[in-house]
């Protein structure tokens, strides 16, 4: 099991990095959708 | 966009999510169960099945930036600018993973985390160029000039990629030469099971790119829609 630690570390970085990026993308999209809905609501109220 | 079109797009997106998930799972099974351990380097060589696809994905992403930037400068269509920006961000993420997994692989094999050889240095330069591209895009003063400067940087940055590819042939480097594309043909320098595993991993990462692109492009379009409504609100008040 020589160098298993290095292989494990590489995996953690790759999958951790991808999962973190997907998570931030989803978070940003959710926040933008919320902003958009709020803006549309305000505009429709103002007529 | 009509509700039918939106529903169709959502179905396509869900199919891509499932396909990508399945491909990534197949890649993991191939990497950790199917493929035999390499004789010289041992277990650590399995990093190649992540390292090479990450490099491929980042180069592909920067190629998309290159093409979309040319099309943006030519057609002056914001759509191409959106694609270029989205692809650059994904390229930087995966180029960062290349620069992280490379040293982790190099440490036990070369005895050093980093050496300033042509392949490693030119990859680091590529990463710096596209990080600069994203920093330029992040400038608060929005406008077509910023998009144009970014497009020029996106095109110039890509010119580094052929240099990275051929650097291992032009100079004596620590980084090994490609075993996938050799003088004898594609995949001749590798065991068939290793080549198959790398192929599965490359396909999985390519699907992941399209999935991420879809999300990132949607984000830019949402931002544009918000800006448009804000302007509308400003003018109406």
Image (cartoon, coloured by chain):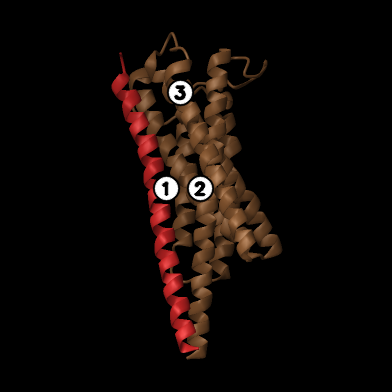
Chain colours: A red, B brown
Please, what secondary structure does the residue beneath circle 2 have?
helix
Residue with the mark numbered 3: B29
Image coords of residue B7 (percent x, y): 59, 57
Image coords of residue B97 (percent x, y): 42, 37
**Residue located at (45% from left, 65% from top):** A33
Q: Are marks 2 and 1 in contact (CB under 8 Å)?
A: yes
Image coords of residue B72 (percent x, y): 65, 60
How far separated are the C-alphas under marks 1 and 3?
22 Å
Please, what secondary structure does the residue beneath circle 1 have?
helix
Q: Are marks 1 and 3 on the same chain?
A: no
Residue B95 versus residue B221 in the image, above or below: above
**Subunit bearing disc 3:** B
| Other residues around mark 2 within 10 Å, as few (<14) / some (14–19) / many (≥20) | many
Indicate which disc residue B134 carries: none
Image coords of residue A13 (percent x, y): 35, 35
How far separated are the C-alphas under marks 2 and 1?
7 Å
- Residue at the farthest top position: B39
Indicate which disc residue A22 carries: 1
Please, what secondary structure does the residue beneath circle 3 have?
helix
Q: Are marks 1 and 3 in contact (CB under 8 Å)?
A: no
| Other residues around mark 3 within 10 Å, as few (<14) / some (14–19) / many (≥20) | few
Number of numbered discs overlaid on the protein picture = 3
Q: Is residue B190 visible?
A: no
Indicate which disc residue B212 carries: 2
Q: Nearer the viewer, residue A39 or A4?
A: A39
Q: Nearer the viewer, residue B5 or B215?
A: B5
**Subunit bearing disc 1:** A
**Subunit bearing disc 2:** B
């Amino acid at each position: 099991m020589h160098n298993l630690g290095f292989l494990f570390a590489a995996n953690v970085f790759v999958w951790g990095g991808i999962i973190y990026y997907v998570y931030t993308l989803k978070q940003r999209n959710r926040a933008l959708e919320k902003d958009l809905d709020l803006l549309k609501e305000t505009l429709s109220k103002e007529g | 966009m009509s509700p039918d079109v939106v529903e169709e797009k959502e179905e396509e997106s869900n199919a891509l999510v499932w396909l990508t998930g399945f491909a990534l799972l197949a890649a993991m099974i191939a990497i950790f169960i199917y493929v035999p351990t390499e004789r010289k380097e041992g277990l650590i060589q399995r990093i190649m099945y992540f390292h090479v696809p990450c490099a491929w994905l980042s180069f592909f992403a920067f190629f998309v930036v290159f093409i979309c930037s040319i099309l943006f400068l030519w057609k002056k269509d914001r759509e191409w600018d959106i694609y270029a920006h989205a692809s650059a961000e994904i390229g930087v993420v995966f180029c960062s993973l290349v620069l992280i997994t490379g040293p982790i692989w190099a440490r036990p094999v070369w005895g050093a985390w980093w050496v300033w050889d042509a392949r490693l240095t030119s990859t680091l330069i590529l990463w710096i160029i596209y990080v600069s591209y994203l920093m330029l895009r992040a400038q608060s003063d929005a406008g077509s000039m910023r998009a144009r400067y970014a497009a020029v940087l996106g095109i110039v940055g890509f010119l580094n990629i052929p240099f990275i590819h051929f650097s291992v042939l032009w100079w004596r480097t620590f980084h090994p030469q490609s075993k996938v594309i050799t003088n004898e043909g594609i995949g001749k320098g590798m065991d068939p099971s290793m080549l198959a595993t790398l192929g599965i991993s490359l396909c999985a990462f390519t699907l992941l790119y399209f999935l991420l692109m879809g999300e990132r492009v949607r984000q830019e379009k949402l931002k544009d829609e918000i800006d448009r409504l804000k302007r509308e609100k400003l003018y109406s008040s």
